[in-house]
Image: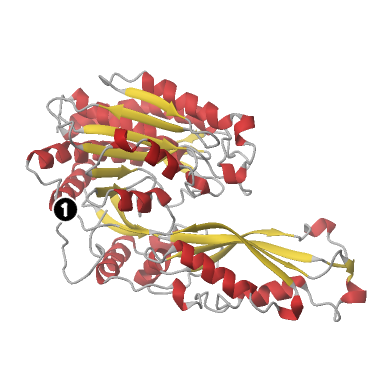
Amino acid sequence: MDAQQADRYVAAKWDDEIVPQLVEYIRIPNKSPMFDADWAAHGYMDDAVELMVAWARRQPIPGMQVEVVRLEGRTPLIFIEIPAAHGGRDDDCVLLYGHLDKQPEMTGWDDDLGPWTPVLRQDRLYGRGGADDGYAIFGSLASILALHEQQLPHARCVVLIEACEESGSYDLPAYVDHLAARIGQPSLVVCLDSGCGNYDQLWCTTSLRGLAGGNLTVQVLEEGVHSGDASGVVPSSFRILRDLLSRIEDEDSGRILLDGLHAPIPDGRVAQAARAAEVLGSAVFDKFPLLPGMRPMNDDLAELVLNRTWRPALSVTGVGGIPPLDSAGNVLRPHSAVKLSLRLPPTVDGKRAGELLHEALTRDPPYGAKVTLALEKAATGWNAPAMSPWLERAIDEASRAFYGQPAMYMGEGGSIPFMGMLGEKFPAAQFMITGVLGPHSNAHGPNEFLHIPMGKRVTASVARVIAEHHLASERGETTGSAVAPDSGQRHGDHGCC
C-alpha cells in the first residue's frame, strides 16, 4: 500500500462525503430501544438506516450487495457483502462491525450544542452518535474503497451494522444465527466501536468489561405522608436503599465487596496498563471534566487504568421516586429507586454476576421493606485471544504509517456485547478492536464529539490491516493457532486485539 496515496484518498472521502453524511445522521434522534420503547412507531431508526444504506449503495465497489435484514419484532440490521477483489480470496472473510443506535439526550450540553444539533468546530463534529458509532459504516466502506483505489487485493468482506448495541445487543444473536451461512467463518474481525487513549497513535482494545444492572426499588409506604409526623417512626426508604448499596460497595473507597464480582488480572494486562499509563501520563484522568480541586481515586496511574478496565465498579445512573428540588415538599416519600450500572471484569460471567447482585440486595430487607431489583442487563465482558504475529506487525505498521507513532494496546471500561458473542462463535478469528472515542469525546454524555482526523487515520489504518490480512492469508498465517507473546496463561490472557 502507498500510505500517502491512501491517506489522501481517505481524507478526501471524509471531507467530501462522510462528514456531511454524519451531520445529517446526528440530526436523527434514533435512540436505542431501551431509551425509546416506541422506536418502531417513531420511525427514527428507519430514517438512520435509510440514510446509511442510500450512501452505501452509491459507493463504486464491484459486486457489493447492501441489504436491510428485518426479523419480526427486532431492530433492523444492515448487512453488506463485498466479494474478494484483485486476487483476494473468497474462501476467507473479514468481518467489520459497528452500530447505528444512540444513547439518550442527557443534560448538560453547552448552550450552542445539543444531542441532535450537529456542530462542526475545527476538527470536531459535535452531536450524539457520530463517534459512537455512526462513522463505522462509512469508515468500513471507505477502507475497502481505499484498497480498490490502489487495486490492492482483499478477501471477501462482510459488514454488520446493528441497531440495538446501546441496549445490550439483545437482537444481534438472532441475526448472527439467521445469517450464519452468509457470514461464513471470518479469520479477522474489525470492530470500530471502541476508544483511544489519545489522538496521536492507533489504539487497539485488548479487553472489555461486562455489565450487570437494573432498577433497585425500596418501598415503605402505600403513599407519602407528612415527614414531621412519620419521621422517626417510619424508616426512610432512601436510608434503607443506602444501607443496601453498602452491602455491595464500600462507600469510602468504592471497592466492590462481593468476591464473586472480582477476577484475577492476567500479568500481560497488568504490563499493558503500565505501558499505557507511561504513555498517557495524567491524561489517564484529566481527560475527564473534573471540578477544580477534585482528584482521582488513586495516585498510581497504572492502578487507575486497571480500575477502569479490570476491576468492578458501581455507578448510580438514574433515580426514581424523588421529586426535583423545586417541588419537594415536607413528605416522607413512599419509595426510592435507583438505576444501577455495575461494570464487571472481562472474565466474570455476566449472568452469575446478576444473580449475586440480586441475592445481595434483596435478602433480609431491613424493617421488612419491599425491595425489588429488576435486572435489565447481565452481559459478560471480553478478553482478546492471543494475537497472531502477522496482525501485531500489521497494526504497528499501520500506526507508524498514518500516525508516525507505534500502536498502543489497552483495555476499555465499557462493553461491546458483540465481541464476546463472536469470540464464542469464531474461536479461530483474530480481532482488531479500535475506535475514535478519545480524550474529552464524552460518549453517552453532553458535548459528545467525533475527532475527525482520528476518524480518517483509523479508516486508513483499517485499510492497511485488511491489505496485510490478504498477504497473511496467502502465507497461510490466518488459520490455525495464534502465538501468544507470553506462555503459561490460559484463555488468551496475553494477546492483544
Q: Which quadrant of the structure image shows residue 269?
A: bottom left
The vertical placement of 247 against 345, above or below, is below
Q: Amino acid at mark 1?
A: Ser
Pick the quarter of the image with the N terminus: top left
Q: Residue at x 46, y 72 (%)?
A: 261
Q: Position of residue 436 (x, y in %)?
A: 38, 45
Q: In the picture provided, is 152 more to the left or to the right than 125?
A: left
- Residue 16 visible in the current orientation: no
Q: In the picture provided, is 106 more to the left or to the right than 171?
A: right
In this rendered view, identify the residue nearer to me: 338 or 17: 338
Q: Residue at x 50, y 42 (%)?
A: 164
Q: Position of residue 413 (x, y in %)?
A: 42, 59
Q: Which quadrant of the structure image shows residue 346?
A: bottom left
**What residue sits right under mark 1 in the picture?**
388
Q: Residue at x 37, y 65 (%)?
A: 347
Which colouring convention does the figure follow? secondary structure
In this rendered view, identify the residue nearer to me: 54 or 361: 361
Answer few, some or many: residues within 10 Å of disc 1's Cα (few below 14, many 20 plus, some between 14 and 19). Answer: many
For label 1, the SS is: loop
Q: In the picture provided, is 408 more to the left or to the right than 124?
A: left
The vertical placement of 458 against 146, above or below, is below
In this rendered view, identify the residue nearer to me: 423 or 243: 423
Q: Tell me how many marks there are.
A: 1
Q: Position of residue 124 (x, y in %)?
A: 44, 39
The vertical placement of 153 against 464, above or below, is above
Q: Position of residue 98 (x, y in %)?
A: 39, 40
Q: In the picture provided, is 319 more to the left or to the right than 173?
A: right
- Residue 79 visible in the current orientation: yes
